[in-house]
Image (cartoon, rainbow, N blue to C red):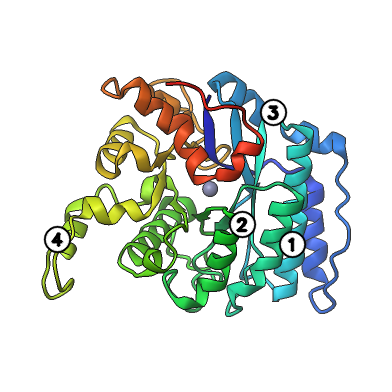
Amino acid sequence: MIIDAHGHYVSAPPPLQAYRGWQLMNQARPTKGKLDLSDGQLEESMQGSIQRLEERGTDRLLLSPQAAAMGHHIGSELISRYWTQTNNEVIHRICERFPERYIGVAQLPQSPGVSPKNCIDELERTVTEFGFVGCNINPDPTAGAGFTPSMADEWWYPLYEKMVELDVPGMVHATSTLDPALHLVGAHYVNVDTAAAVELLYSRLFDEFPTLKIIIPHGGGAVPFQWGRFQAINHHPAITPGEPERFEETVKKLYFDAAVYDRDAMEMLIRKVGVDRVLFASELMGTAGSTDPDTGKAFDDTKQYVDQLTWLSDEERQKLFEQNARQVFPRLSQYLGEPTPA
Ligand SMILES: [Zn+2]
């Protein structure tokens, strides 16, 4: 079985954008309103994604709303809440229509300066009523226009407590940025991933929440490549007092997804963080849907890079493609049968 742990609904037809436009025109009087999106439009919008899943042999895709469109910084907390609810409801409809393809992951109604406590209701609704198995967490709802506490700060604890209670993991996921000097998917996303990983790894968070599960997407940003830098921090007495810990151990606090788009990056990720910490992923349909001129295949057909790592055992492949996702997303068990033997 192949579980892709990271995908977004990026092919929404015009009614979803029309809804957003209507919502933003009426910011002074926020109401949830109604999304006028038919089942036929919804089904048609998924055909490209389904075709890719079939071509690549992917059994299940964990699907969440379009990340760049989360727009937590736009409008009030209520605007963010209604927009989030509407998008999660669309994901739920897709998962109900195509239960053999998609399993839902929630957007959260984050808003600048608003305690993540405000996300608890929507997380609970999507998990208990919709059957979602995880959530995306944006480390900076201000989109660069302000400051948000570190993801290791107690400010976030109410959300983490609910995640632990519901037994759902969170994937760190930025949305758009207001900074004109940051390319959205070329720089901003991977910057945010790296920064969040560092904040979380050099913190007491997992001492206080030993069962909390956080996934850093896009191969952990710069984590595998800057390995020696982080190792040096661990062994620098002025920065990290006390008995030094090897970074190989530090990094095991987190999980990483395999949405990296060349063989060498895939190999470095798995060798550095260890096969037990990596979840197969492509971020379908997203940044890397274009075709590699050297291979004729899509960059985000990430299974090809795993296949090229001939040193991986069958057991290790089974962990990457299935077992690790089952462990990190325990609620997947309600949808999947018995684990595939290696
Ligand atoms: Zn993503």
Q: CA distance from mark 2 to mark 3?
A: 23 Å
Q: CA distance from mark 2 to mark 1?
A: 23 Å
Q: Is there CB contact under 8 Å for labels 4 and 3? A: no
State the SS at label 2. helix
Question: Which mark identifies residue 189?
Answer: none
In depth, the one of 139 and 20 nearer the eye is: 139
Question: Which mark identifies residue 166?
Answer: 2
Q: Is there CB contact under 8 Å for labels 1 and 3? A: no
Identify which amino acid the numbered label 1 is placed on.
Answer: Trp
Please indicate whether residue 58 sits to the left or right of residue 228 in the image. right
State the SS at label 3. loop
Which of label 1 and label 3 is nearer to you? Answer: 3
Question: Which mark identifies residue 232?
Answer: 4
Check disc 3 and report the residue beneath it. 100
State the SS at label 4. helix
Check disc 1 and report the residue beneath it. 83
In depth, the one of 251 and 20 nearer the eye is: 251
Which of label 4 and label 1 is nearer to you? Answer: 4
Counting residues from the start of the chain, the first of labels 4 and 2 encountered is 2
Which of label 4 and label 2 is nearer to you? Answer: 2
The quadrant of the rendering that contains the C terminus is top left
Q: Residues within 10 Å of mark 2 (few under 14, many from 20)?
A: some
Residue 300 makes an appearance in the image:
no
Q: Position of residue 128 (x, y in %)?
A: 72, 53
State the SS at label 1. helix
Which of label 2 and label 3 is nearer to you? Answer: 2
Q: Residues within 10 Å of mark 3 (few under 14, many from 20)?
A: few
Q: Position of residue 52 (x, y in %)?
A: 60, 26
Identify which amino acid the numbered label 3 is placed on.
Answer: Glu
Distance from mark 4 CB to nearest ligand 1 atom below 8 Å: no
Q: CA distance from mark 4 to mark 3?
A: 46 Å
